[in-house]
Amino acid sequence: MRFIGVDLGWRSQPSGLCCLEWSQGQLELVALDRKAEIADVLSWVDSCALPETPAMIAVDAPTLIPNSTGMRLSDRLSHQYFGRYHAGCYPANLGRPFAQRTVGFGLELEDRGFVHAPEIVPQQLGRYQIEVFPHPAIVHLFGLERILKYKKGSLQERRLELEKLRTFILTVLPTLEPRTNLQQKRQKLEIPLLPSSGAALKAVEDQLDSLICAYVGAHWWYWGSERNWVLGNLTTGYIVVPSACSVPVCR
């Protein structure tokens, strides 16, 4: 089973891409990349998940938008439950300039056999897609009191916050279930070091976000609703977020 994370560029921005593979009871890093054009993103997805290959694709973008105006139920719930962490998501409706691009991406995945999976039988092979959102996932996975603010601020401030995320990925994810082996020497790929320039730092940021997306996809497949929240549903749009042990599941 493969888990593909897509930090989708909502407009014309490049997209971060990650592929993890479930092998011998752990998640191994297969690919980490960044592509500018949607056609190239889809070709990359095709290369990682050949036809009939079981895979879960976790996309950081609103791929289901039924509402013409306002915000989706999932967006409102993200603010209700994660606003205090500064982790409420950007509101989506069909009037937004990104809507055609993000919804179209979800439809392209459906054409490839990846069905939306706001409900799932844990650890059942298949071809699935879900919407995810890294900020609340990071808060819950790493037990934080607020988001890591690597999106805004000075270059140095962003770099320091992104370094925290990189450290959590390397030190905390291997202790969770499903576990990763990202620090093992036999791993073919390595999590990149953080560069000093702004453009290069943004490229690594996109890749780390995509890795979080891929892990959330694996966490959803492994545990289902036992240890994940589903904000919204198939009709209204939904976001899958790993749950915190002390907080009841939101559906």
Image (cartoon, rainbow, N blue to C red):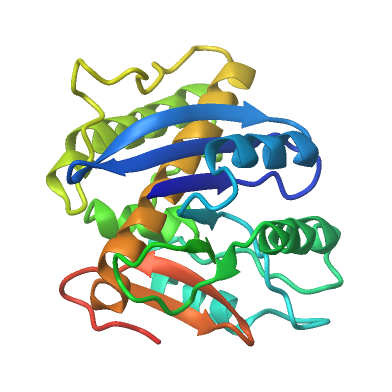
Image quadrant where residue 236 sits = bottom right
Is residue 214 positioned above or below 104 on the image?
Answer: above
Position of the C terminus by quadrant:
bottom left
Q: Residue at x 69, y 61 (%)?
A: 106
Q: Residue at x 27, y 62 (%)?
A: 222
Q: Residue at x 56, y 64 (%)?
A: 89
Residue 55 in percent (x, y) is at 47, 53
Of the pair 90 and 129, the residue shown nearer to us: 129
Is residue 192 positioned above or below 81 on the image?
Answer: above
Q: Residue at x 33, y 17 (%)?
A: 188
Residue 137 in percent (x, y) is at 37, 58
Residue 215 in percent (x, y) is at 36, 49
With 171 as the anchor, is 204 left or right in this view? right
Q: Is residue 85 visible?
A: yes
Image quadrant where residue 29 sits = top left
Residue 176 in percent (x, y) is at 16, 50
Q: Is residue 146 visible?
A: no
Of the pair 32 and 9, the residue shown nearer to us: 32
Of the pair 81 and 68, the residue shown nearer to us: 68
